[in-house]
Amino acid sequence: DDVRISKESAYTTDFTPGSIRTGLYLPLDSGLEDNSGAGHKVEEHGDVRLLRGQALSKYGKGAAYLNGSSCLSFPDSESWQFGTGDFTIELWVKPEDFVGRYGTLFSYRRENHSRRGLTIYLKNDNNLVVYPGTSYNSSSLINTGGRIQKDQWAHLAFTRKDGHFKVFVGGTQVHEILNHTSSISGASNYQLWLGKVPTGDNLYYKGVIDDV
C-alpha cells in the first residue's frame, strides 16, 4: 500500500507513518498509475493483481498483489537518481510467503548486470535486509534488525539525510549507517524495480504492497 519515493529526507527520528508525495507515488487505489504528477510509466511483468476494497488494502480502496513471479518496473528517471543527496523511500507491505532466501521489495539497478544499486530485501527468516549501494562484497548486505511478519501490514521507510542512512519499521528506527555518501545514480539501462531484483535468480517478493 502507498509506495513513495522522494529526493528529500522525510524522517530523521521515530515517527507516525505519514505521507509524502513527490518523485513517485503509487496509491494503488484504482490502478497502477503514478500519482506524483511526474507521470512515470509503470510496466507490469507477470500477473500483478489489483485488489479492490478497504478490507484488502492498508489505506484507500486498493492495493497490489505480487504472486512470487510478478513485479513492476519503471524506466530510469531523474526522480530516483539520488546521487549523494537526501532521499526517502517508503511503502506498506504485507508479505504472504518467502519464495526463496530473499524476496526483493525495491531494487535500482541494470537488468542481468553484476553492478548493484540500492536494494531492499525481506529474508526468509523475517529480517529486513538492505544492500546500501556501496561497492559490493559479501559483507555489504546489512541485516537491519527490523523483523517483518507474514500476513501482517508493516510500514517501511528508508531515508538518507546529510549522509546518514536510516531504516524505520512502523515509524521506529531500527538501523543507521553513518557517513553513507555513496552515489545512487543510474547508468545505462538502469531501472527501478518493485518486487524483484533483475538478475538470473530474480529473488521475487510474494505478498501485497500499498502506498508506494
Image (cartoon, grey):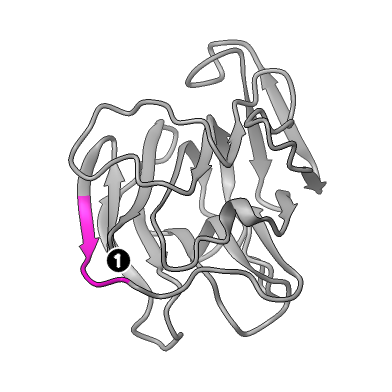
Q: Residue at x 60, y 51 (%)?
A: 79
Question: Which of 106/66 is in front?
Answer: 106
Characterize the local packing of mark 1: few (<14), some (14-19) or many (20 or more) Cα atoms within 10 angstroms: some
Q: Is residue 128 placed above or below 186 in the rendered structure?
A: above
x, y (%) of residue 66? Answer: 66, 42
- Which quadrant would residue 145 be assigned to in this image? bottom left
Question: Which of 98/33 is in front?
Answer: 33
Question: Which of 108/150 is in front?
Answer: 108
133 sits to left or right of 53: left
**Circle 1 sits on which residue?**
143
Q: Residue at x 69, y 33 (%)?
A: 34
Q: Is residue 111 placed above or below 103 in the rendered structure?
A: below
* Secondary structure type for disc 1: strand
Residue 38 visible at all: yes
- State which quarter of the image contains the C terminus: top right
Which contiguous range is marked in magenta? Answer: 174-180
Is-magenta flag for residue 177? yes
Q: Is residue 128 placed above or below 9 in the rendered structure?
A: below
Amino acid type for the residue under numbered disc 1 = Asn
Q: Residue at x 47, y 49 (%)?
A: 7
Extreme-bottom residue of the structure = 137
Is-magenta flag for residue 65? no
Residue 195 visible at all: no
x, y (%) of residue 53? Answer: 62, 11
92 sits to left or right of 13: right
x, y (%) of residue 111? Answer: 73, 72
